[in-house]
Image (cartoon, rainbow, N blue to C red):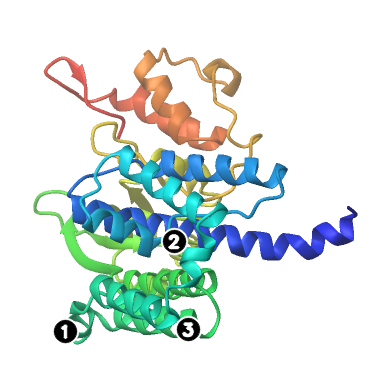
Amino acid sequence: ASFETFAVVLPFAASVAAVGLIETLLTQQLVDDVTERRTSTHKECIAQGAGNLVNGFFGAMGGCAMIGQSMINVQAGGRTRVSGITCALAIASYVTFGAGFIERVPIAALVGTMLCLVLDIFDWTSFARIRKIPKTDAAVLVLVTGVTVVTNLAVAVFAGVVLSALGYAYKSSQRIEARRTSVPVKTNSVEYTTVYEISGPLFFGSVGSFTEQLDPKTEGNDRVVLDFASSKVWDSSALVAIDDVAEKFRNCGKVVTLRHLSADCAALLRKAGDLVEVNLEEDPEYPVAADYDEEELETLTAHDAHGTHVSLEDWEKTALQRQYTTPAGFRVLVDKIEEDGPPTRGGRPRGIM
Protein backbone atom coordinates (compact mmCIF):
# COMPACT_ATOMS: atom_id res chain seq x y z
CA ALA A 1 0.00 0.00 0.00
CA SER A 2 1.26 3.46 -0.90
CA PHE A 3 0.36 6.94 0.17
CA GLU A 4 -1.58 7.44 -3.06
CA THR A 5 -3.76 4.43 -2.23
CA PHE A 6 -4.27 5.72 1.29
CA ALA A 7 -5.28 9.15 -0.06
CA VAL A 8 -7.86 7.51 -2.32
CA VAL A 9 -9.32 5.27 0.39
CA LEU A 10 -9.36 7.84 3.23
CA PRO A 11 -12.29 10.02 2.03
CA PHE A 12 -14.51 6.99 1.47
CA ALA A 13 -13.46 5.45 4.78
CA ALA A 14 -14.29 8.68 6.63
CA SER A 15 -17.67 8.89 4.90
CA VAL A 16 -18.55 5.27 5.69
CA ALA A 17 -17.41 5.71 9.31
CA ALA A 18 -19.55 8.85 9.69
CA VAL A 19 -22.61 7.17 8.20
CA GLY A 20 -22.14 4.12 10.40
CA LEU A 21 -21.69 6.18 13.55
CA ILE A 22 -24.68 8.38 12.80
CA GLU A 23 -26.93 5.43 12.04
CA THR A 24 -25.76 3.69 15.21
CA LEU A 25 -26.56 6.70 17.39
CA LEU A 26 -29.95 7.18 15.70
CA THR A 27 -30.76 3.50 16.23
CA GLN A 28 -29.68 3.71 19.84
CA GLN A 29 -31.87 6.76 20.43
CA LEU A 30 -34.86 5.07 18.79
CA VAL A 31 -34.40 1.88 20.81
CA ASP A 32 -34.03 3.89 24.03
CA ASP A 33 -37.30 5.67 23.30
CA VAL A 34 -39.12 2.38 22.72
CA THR A 35 -37.66 0.59 25.75
CA GLU A 36 -37.76 3.72 27.96
CA ARG A 37 -34.13 3.21 28.95
CA ARG A 38 -30.95 5.23 28.59
CA THR A 39 -27.83 3.49 27.33
CA SER A 40 -24.27 4.83 27.09
CA THR A 41 -23.46 6.35 23.70
CA HIS A 42 -19.73 6.40 24.52
CA LYS A 43 -19.62 2.65 25.13
CA GLU A 44 -21.56 2.01 21.94
CA CYS A 45 -19.19 4.11 19.82
CA ILE A 46 -16.05 2.59 21.36
CA ALA A 47 -17.39 -0.94 20.97
CA GLN A 48 -18.33 -0.33 17.34
CA GLY A 49 -14.93 1.19 16.55
CA ALA A 50 -13.05 -1.68 18.22
CA GLY A 51 -15.18 -4.27 16.42
CA ASN A 52 -14.65 -2.68 13.01
CA LEU A 53 -10.92 -2.35 13.68
CA VAL A 54 -10.63 -6.07 14.42
CA ASN A 55 -12.76 -6.83 11.35
CA GLY A 56 -10.28 -4.99 9.17
CA PHE A 57 -7.42 -7.28 10.20
CA PHE A 58 -9.42 -10.29 8.99
CA GLY A 59 -10.46 -8.65 5.72
CA ALA A 60 -14.11 -8.49 6.79
CA MET A 61 -16.58 -5.70 6.09
CA GLY A 62 -17.24 -3.05 8.73
CA GLY A 63 -20.69 -2.77 10.25
CA CYS A 64 -22.92 -0.66 12.42
CA ALA A 65 -26.27 -0.82 14.17
CA MET A 66 -29.17 -1.46 11.81
CA ILE A 67 -32.46 0.27 12.45
CA GLY A 68 -34.53 -2.46 10.77
CA GLN A 69 -33.01 -5.41 12.61
CA SER A 70 -32.94 -3.55 15.92
CA MET A 71 -36.62 -2.57 15.71
CA ILE A 72 -37.68 -6.10 14.76
CA ASN A 73 -35.72 -7.39 17.73
CA VAL A 74 -37.19 -4.84 20.13
CA GLN A 75 -40.75 -5.26 18.87
CA ALA A 76 -40.39 -9.02 19.33
CA GLY A 77 -39.71 -8.44 23.02
CA GLY A 78 -35.92 -8.35 23.10
CA ARG A 79 -34.58 -6.31 26.02
CA THR A 80 -31.30 -7.91 27.11
CA ARG A 81 -27.97 -8.88 25.59
CA VAL A 82 -29.31 -12.37 24.98
CA SER A 83 -31.62 -11.03 22.27
CA GLY A 84 -28.72 -9.32 20.49
CA ILE A 85 -26.57 -12.45 20.64
CA THR A 86 -29.46 -14.57 19.37
CA CYS A 87 -30.02 -12.20 16.44
CA ALA A 88 -26.28 -12.26 15.60
CA LEU A 89 -26.16 -16.08 15.69
CA ALA A 90 -29.27 -16.27 13.50
CA ILE A 91 -27.70 -13.97 10.88
CA ALA A 92 -24.46 -15.97 11.03
CA SER A 93 -26.40 -19.20 10.43
CA TYR A 94 -28.20 -17.69 7.45
CA VAL A 95 -24.90 -16.66 5.91
CA THR A 96 -23.07 -19.95 6.54
CA PHE A 97 -25.54 -22.76 5.86
CA GLY A 98 -28.99 -21.17 5.50
CA ALA A 99 -28.38 -19.26 2.28
CA GLY A 100 -30.31 -21.82 0.24
CA PHE A 101 -33.37 -21.37 2.42
CA ILE A 102 -33.17 -17.55 2.34
CA GLU A 103 -32.98 -17.61 -1.44
CA ARG A 104 -36.46 -19.19 -1.55
CA VAL A 105 -38.04 -16.12 0.15
CA PRO A 106 -39.56 -13.88 -2.56
CA ILE A 107 -37.99 -10.46 -2.95
CA ALA A 108 -41.46 -8.90 -2.81
CA ALA A 109 -41.96 -10.34 0.68
CA LEU A 110 -38.70 -8.82 1.89
CA VAL A 111 -39.58 -5.46 0.32
CA GLY A 112 -43.00 -5.53 1.97
CA THR A 113 -41.44 -6.31 5.33
CA MET A 114 -39.00 -3.40 5.05
CA LEU A 115 -41.76 -1.07 3.85
CA CYS A 116 -43.92 -1.89 6.87
CA LEU A 117 -40.90 -1.31 9.10
CA VAL A 118 -40.21 2.08 7.51
CA LEU A 119 -43.82 3.15 7.93
CA ASP A 120 -43.67 2.07 11.54
CA ILE A 121 -40.51 3.93 12.54
CA PHE A 122 -41.12 7.10 10.50
CA ASP A 123 -41.98 10.13 12.61
CA TRP A 124 -45.23 11.20 10.98
CA THR A 125 -45.72 14.02 13.49
CA SER A 126 -42.97 15.94 11.65
CA PHE A 127 -45.50 17.06 9.03
CA ALA A 128 -47.82 18.39 11.73
CA ARG A 129 -44.98 20.25 13.49
CA ILE A 130 -43.37 21.76 10.43
CA ARG A 131 -45.75 24.75 10.47
CA LYS A 132 -45.29 25.35 14.18
CA ILE A 133 -41.54 25.00 14.58
CA PRO A 134 -39.13 27.86 13.70
CA LYS A 135 -38.40 28.38 10.03
CA THR A 136 -34.74 27.49 10.48
CA ASP A 137 -35.66 24.13 12.01
CA ALA A 138 -38.13 23.46 9.21
CA ALA A 139 -35.45 24.34 6.65
CA VAL A 140 -33.01 21.95 8.33
CA LEU A 141 -35.64 19.18 8.30
CA VAL A 142 -36.30 19.61 4.58
CA LEU A 143 -32.60 20.03 3.72
CA VAL A 144 -31.45 16.90 5.56
CA THR A 145 -34.24 14.83 4.02
CA GLY A 146 -33.46 16.02 0.49
CA VAL A 147 -29.69 15.71 0.79
CA THR A 148 -30.04 12.20 2.23
CA VAL A 149 -32.01 11.09 -0.82
CA VAL A 150 -29.61 12.74 -3.29
CA THR A 151 -26.25 11.90 -1.63
CA ASN A 152 -25.86 10.07 1.69
CA LEU A 153 -26.56 10.44 5.39
CA ALA A 154 -23.11 11.80 6.31
CA VAL A 155 -23.33 14.71 3.88
CA ALA A 156 -26.93 15.38 4.93
CA VAL A 157 -26.08 15.56 8.63
CA PHE A 158 -23.09 17.83 7.96
CA ALA A 159 -25.26 20.17 5.87
CA GLY A 160 -27.91 20.20 8.61
CA VAL A 161 -25.36 21.04 11.29
CA VAL A 162 -23.94 23.92 9.23
CA LEU A 163 -27.40 25.36 8.55
CA SER A 164 -28.39 25.00 12.22
CA ALA A 165 -25.20 26.77 13.33
CA LEU A 166 -25.79 29.64 10.92
CA GLY A 167 -29.39 29.96 12.08
CA TYR A 168 -28.36 30.00 15.73
CA ALA A 169 -25.67 32.62 15.07
CA TYR A 170 -28.20 34.84 13.27
CA LYS A 171 -30.77 34.56 16.06
CA SER A 172 -28.16 35.26 18.73
CA SER A 173 -26.87 38.30 16.85
CA GLN A 174 -30.32 39.90 17.09
CA ARG A 175 -30.37 39.72 20.89
CA ILE A 176 -27.59 42.22 21.62
CA GLU A 177 -28.87 45.48 23.10
CA ALA A 178 -27.32 48.56 24.74
CA ARG A 179 -29.77 50.37 27.06
CA ARG A 180 -28.67 53.93 27.89
CA THR A 181 -29.37 55.58 31.24
CA SER A 182 -27.95 58.69 32.91
CA VAL A 183 -27.19 58.70 36.63
CA PRO A 184 -25.76 61.57 38.73
CA VAL A 185 -22.12 61.26 39.73
CA LYS A 186 -23.06 62.22 43.30
CA THR A 187 -26.29 63.03 45.10
CA ASN A 188 -27.71 66.38 43.88
CA SER A 189 -24.83 66.64 41.41
CA VAL A 190 -25.19 68.39 38.08
CA GLU A 191 -22.68 66.01 36.51
CA TYR A 192 -24.07 62.80 35.10
CA THR A 193 -22.58 59.48 34.09
CA THR A 194 -23.96 57.60 31.11
CA VAL A 195 -24.39 53.88 31.80
CA TYR A 196 -24.83 51.52 28.86
CA GLU A 197 -26.29 48.23 30.09
CA ILE A 198 -25.20 45.64 27.53
CA SER A 199 -27.44 42.57 27.28
CA GLY A 200 -27.20 39.53 25.05
CA PRO A 201 -24.26 37.53 23.69
CA LEU A 202 -21.39 39.50 22.19
CA PHE A 203 -19.58 37.57 19.46
CA PHE A 204 -18.57 37.87 15.80
CA GLY A 205 -22.19 37.89 14.65
CA SER A 206 -23.37 40.69 16.97
CA VAL A 207 -20.39 43.09 17.08
CA GLY A 208 -21.85 45.13 14.21
CA SER A 209 -25.09 45.79 16.06
CA PHE A 210 -23.12 46.43 19.26
CA THR A 211 -20.95 49.17 17.74
CA GLU A 212 -23.92 50.76 15.94
CA GLN A 213 -25.77 51.30 19.23
CA LEU A 214 -22.82 53.15 20.82
CA ASP A 215 -22.04 56.51 19.23
CA PRO A 216 -19.29 58.43 21.09
CA LYS A 217 -19.76 61.57 18.97
CA THR A 218 -23.35 62.12 20.12
CA GLU A 219 -22.66 61.31 23.78
CA GLY A 220 -23.24 64.41 25.95
CA ASN A 221 -21.84 63.23 29.30
CA ASP A 222 -18.12 63.13 30.00
CA ARG A 223 -18.25 59.88 31.99
CA VAL A 224 -19.32 56.63 30.30
CA VAL A 225 -19.77 53.19 31.85
CA LEU A 226 -20.17 50.01 29.80
CA ASP A 227 -21.84 47.44 32.04
CA PHE A 228 -21.63 43.82 30.83
CA ALA A 229 -23.53 42.25 33.75
CA SER A 230 -26.27 40.95 31.43
CA SER A 231 -23.94 40.08 28.56
CA LYS A 232 -21.34 37.44 27.83
CA VAL A 233 -18.26 37.91 25.67
CA TRP A 234 -17.73 34.85 23.50
CA ASP A 235 -14.76 35.32 21.20
CA SER A 236 -11.87 37.49 20.07
CA SER A 237 -14.09 39.52 17.71
CA ALA A 238 -16.04 40.72 20.73
CA LEU A 239 -12.83 41.68 22.53
CA VAL A 240 -11.70 43.71 19.53
CA ALA A 241 -15.09 45.44 19.40
CA ILE A 242 -14.88 46.38 23.09
CA ASP A 243 -11.36 47.72 22.58
CA ASP A 244 -12.41 49.79 19.57
CA VAL A 245 -15.50 51.23 21.28
CA ALA A 246 -13.52 52.18 24.39
CA GLU A 247 -10.82 53.78 22.23
CA LYS A 248 -13.42 55.84 20.32
CA PHE A 249 -14.93 57.13 23.56
CA ARG A 250 -11.51 58.10 24.88
CA ASN A 251 -10.62 59.85 21.62
CA CYS A 252 -13.76 61.95 22.11
CA GLY A 253 -12.55 63.02 25.56
CA LYS A 254 -14.76 60.65 27.57
CA VAL A 255 -13.76 58.84 30.75
CA VAL A 256 -14.66 55.21 30.12
CA THR A 257 -15.15 52.40 32.64
CA LEU A 258 -15.86 48.75 31.88
CA ARG A 259 -17.78 46.74 34.46
CA HIS A 260 -18.65 43.09 35.06
CA LEU A 261 -16.22 41.52 32.64
CA SER A 262 -14.75 38.10 33.35
CA ALA A 263 -11.10 37.62 34.25
CA ASP A 264 -10.25 36.29 30.79
CA CYS A 265 -11.93 39.27 29.11
CA ALA A 266 -9.96 41.75 31.19
CA ALA A 267 -6.72 39.87 30.60
CA LEU A 268 -7.18 39.68 26.82
CA LEU A 269 -8.22 43.29 26.22
CA ARG A 270 -5.39 45.12 24.43
CA LYS A 271 -6.32 48.80 24.60
CA ALA A 272 -8.98 48.94 27.33
CA GLY A 273 -7.44 46.60 29.90
CA ASP A 274 -6.72 49.44 32.32
CA LEU A 275 -10.38 50.58 32.23
CA VAL A 276 -11.83 47.44 33.84
CA GLU A 277 -13.19 47.63 37.35
CA VAL A 278 -12.65 44.52 39.49
CA ASN A 279 -15.30 43.17 41.84
CA LEU A 280 -14.60 39.69 43.17
CA GLU A 281 -18.21 39.06 44.18
CA GLU A 282 -20.03 40.34 41.10
CA ASP A 283 -17.62 39.73 38.20
CA PRO A 284 -18.54 36.63 36.18
CA GLU A 285 -16.12 33.80 35.49
CA TYR A 286 -16.06 32.26 32.01
CA PRO A 287 -13.40 31.65 29.36
CA VAL A 288 -13.22 33.39 25.98
CA ALA A 289 -12.77 31.61 22.65
CA ALA A 290 -9.54 33.45 21.74
CA ASP A 291 -5.84 32.73 21.36
CA TYR A 292 -3.92 33.38 24.57
CA ASP A 293 -0.51 35.07 24.42
CA GLU A 294 1.62 33.27 27.00
CA GLU A 295 4.05 36.16 27.44
CA GLU A 296 1.25 38.67 27.92
CA LEU A 297 -0.56 36.48 30.47
CA GLU A 298 2.44 36.00 32.79
CA THR A 299 1.15 36.65 36.30
CA LEU A 300 2.31 39.64 38.34
CA THR A 301 3.83 37.78 41.25
CA ALA A 302 5.96 40.54 42.80
CA HIS A 303 4.40 43.97 43.21
CA ASP A 304 7.78 45.45 44.24
CA ALA A 305 8.96 44.97 40.66
CA HIS A 306 6.47 47.65 39.60
CA GLY A 307 7.81 50.32 41.94
CA THR A 308 5.05 49.99 44.55
CA HIS A 309 5.36 49.41 48.27
CA VAL A 310 1.75 48.63 49.15
CA SER A 311 1.22 45.61 51.38
CA LEU A 312 -1.36 43.48 49.61
CA GLU A 313 -3.25 40.54 51.02
CA ASP A 314 -3.43 37.22 49.16
CA TRP A 315 -6.94 37.84 47.85
CA GLU A 316 -5.85 41.25 46.52
CA LYS A 317 -2.86 39.76 44.74
CA THR A 318 -5.09 37.11 43.23
CA ALA A 319 -7.46 39.75 41.90
CA LEU A 320 -4.62 41.75 40.39
CA GLN A 321 -3.01 38.71 38.80
CA ARG A 322 -6.41 37.60 37.54
CA GLN A 323 -7.46 40.85 35.92
CA TYR A 324 -4.42 42.82 34.82
CA THR A 325 -1.53 42.03 32.53
CA THR A 326 0.10 45.48 32.19
CA PRO A 327 2.09 47.44 34.79
CA ALA A 328 -0.10 50.47 34.07
CA GLY A 329 -3.23 48.61 35.03
CA PHE A 330 -1.50 47.25 38.11
CA ARG A 331 -0.46 50.73 39.32
CA VAL A 332 -3.94 52.17 38.74
CA LEU A 333 -5.44 49.59 41.07
CA VAL A 334 -2.65 49.82 43.63
CA ASP A 335 -3.07 53.60 43.83
CA LYS A 336 -6.79 53.02 44.39
CA ILE A 337 -6.05 50.65 47.28
CA GLU A 338 -3.46 52.98 48.80
CA GLU A 339 -5.85 55.93 48.65
CA ASP A 340 -9.17 54.40 49.71
CA GLY A 341 -8.37 50.95 51.02
CA PRO A 342 -10.36 47.89 49.95
CA PRO A 343 -14.04 48.13 50.93
CA THR A 344 -15.19 45.54 53.42
CA ARG A 345 -18.48 44.14 54.56
CA GLY A 346 -18.72 42.44 57.91
CA GLY A 347 -14.93 42.29 58.26
CA ARG A 348 -14.56 40.38 54.99
CA PRO A 349 -13.04 41.82 51.81
CA ARG A 350 -15.82 42.78 49.43
CA GLY A 351 -13.79 43.39 46.30
CA ILE A 352 -11.52 45.81 44.54
CA MET A 353 -13.35 48.70 42.95
Residues 270 and 238: in front is: 238
Judging by the rendered image, the residue that carries numbered circle 1 is 128
Sequence-wise first label, 2 or 3: 2
Sequence-wise first label, 1 or 3: 1
Eye-nearest disc, 1 or 3: 3
x, y percent for residue 200: 28, 63
Q: Residue at x 60, y 53 (%)?
A: 62
Q: Amino acid at mark 2?
A: Glu
x, y percent for residue 340: 29, 26
Q: Residue at x 54, y 50 (%)?
A: 290
Q: Residue at x 26, y 62 (%)?
A: 199
- Rounded to the nearest angstrom, the CA distance separating label 2 from label 3 is 15 Å
* Residue placed furthest toward the left: 188
Which numbered disc covers residue 78? Answer: none
Residues 219 and 92: in front is: 92
x, y percent for residue 94: 49, 56
Residue 128 seen anywhere in this rendered image of the structure: yes
Q: Amino acid at mark 1?
A: Ala
Q: Amino acid at mark 3?
A: Val
Mark 1 and mark 3 in contact? Answer it, CB < 8 Å. Answer: no
Residue 246 seen anywhere in this rendered image of the structure: no
Quadrant of res 310: top left
Residue 209 shown left or right of residue 345 in the figure: right
Sequence-wise first label, 2 or 1: 2
Examine the rendered structure and indicate whether residue 93 appears above or below residue 113: above
How many other residues sit within 10 Å of disc 2, few (<14), some (14-19) or many (≥20)? some
Judging by the rendered image, the residue that carries numbered circle 3 is 149
x, y percent for residue 325: 54, 35
How many other residues sit within 10 Å of disc 1, few (<14), some (14-19) or many (≥20)? few
